[in-house]
Image: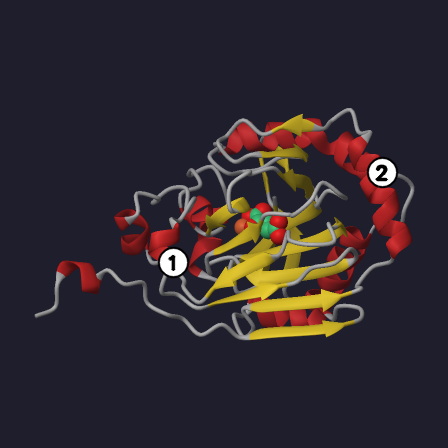
Amino acid sequence: MVTAEASKAPAISPLAVRERTGWISTAEIVSVLKGEIAGLHIRQAFSAEVAEVITASFFRNPGLKERKDGVPGQYIGASHYRKDAATYFAEAENARPFVDAVFDNLVDPVRGLFDALKRELHNQGIELRLARSEHGQANICRAICWSGTGMYALEPHDDVAQVLCAGKDYELAAVASNTVVALNFYPSMPEEGGNLRIWSHKPTVTERKSQGLETTGYPYSTAYLEAVPCHEFELKTGDIALIDGGFIHGVTRQSGNEKRRLLLNCFLGFAQPDLVLWWT
Ligand SMILES: O=C(O)CCC(=O)C(=O)O
Ligand SMILES: [Fe+2]
């Protein structure tokens, strides 16, 4: 007899991962957007000098705030998580000077990647742009230090629930039926820990509901993930990681009190066959 418990076991989805050293190619980003690769880790993708400038300007930035939405962390920029479109875009507009200040006077690697991808997609007849509404426009990224104190600095979650349940005033909801890609730059990493762990499981709406996480996708319990295989990206300063945010992922706790872990993050995905949106 199949028990109710057994039928609740999370379905395993294959996790195609690529890891290498060097600059990231737009073709690889498109592969992640199309769901051909679930995780891409590029080591030493931007320079230690650029990483240092970004990290120093993050910690002295007057726009640095404590998150108050149940996800422990400090940030600059705006997160659409659990916000209606009017609130999110107003926050994005207000935070823009502080986000710009994170890059000081650098030729910024996030903008560089955005521009290169925009050109590549344009050649394929696809528009890439920041998400927008009558209330404003998304920023190119947000900068975050996670500060969870349990087993994870950022608890296991998926990035799709928040897109699927974004209110009607967002253009984002359409992306949820395609791959929601999370793009992460790491300007500062501790010597140990702070890794990005990704599980071989893409929850369905039903599975999310069964965990009481329908609208947030955060946080999945250790018990739920117990039997699911995972892969860990061992991140260092200057690395970039792109993942299919539909797979459950989390950030392991950093050990010791040394350098803090700093992340620049944004999301992107196809809203229509000829339109890719980018938001935070
Ligand atoms: O910090 C990381 O490596 C992952 C961040 C993440 O999963 C998120 O911002 O949704
Ligand atoms: Fe995430």
Residue 103 percent coordinates (x, y)? 84, 42
Residue 77 percent coordinates (x, y)? 67, 35
Front-most of residues 278 and 265: 265
Identify the residue at image location x=73%, y=50%.
190
Q: Is residue 112 above or below residue 121?
A: above
Q: For the residues labelled 1 and 2, say whether their Cβ atoms are less than 8 Å apart.
A: no
Identify the residue at image location x=69%, y=47%.
263
Cβ of mark 1 under 8 A from ligand 2: no
Residue 225 numbered tag: 1
Q: For the residue labelled by badge 1, is the local secondary structure a helix, a strand or a loop?
A: helix
Tell me the amino acid under the disc marked 2. Answer: Ala
Residue 68 numbered tag: none
Front-most of residues 199 and 213: 199
Identify the residue at image location x=58%, y=67%.
39
Tell me the amino acid under the disc marked 1. Answer: Leu
Q: In the rendered structure, which disc, 1 or 2, sits on the residue that comes first in sequence?
A: 2
Q: Quadrant of the N terminus?
A: bottom left
> Residue extending furthest top?
62
Mark 2, residue position: 56
> Residue extending furthest left?
1
Tag nearer the camera, 1 or 2? 1
Residue 259 percent coordinates (x, y)? 77, 44
Q: For the residue labelled by badge 2, is the local secondary structure a helix, a strand or a loop?
A: helix
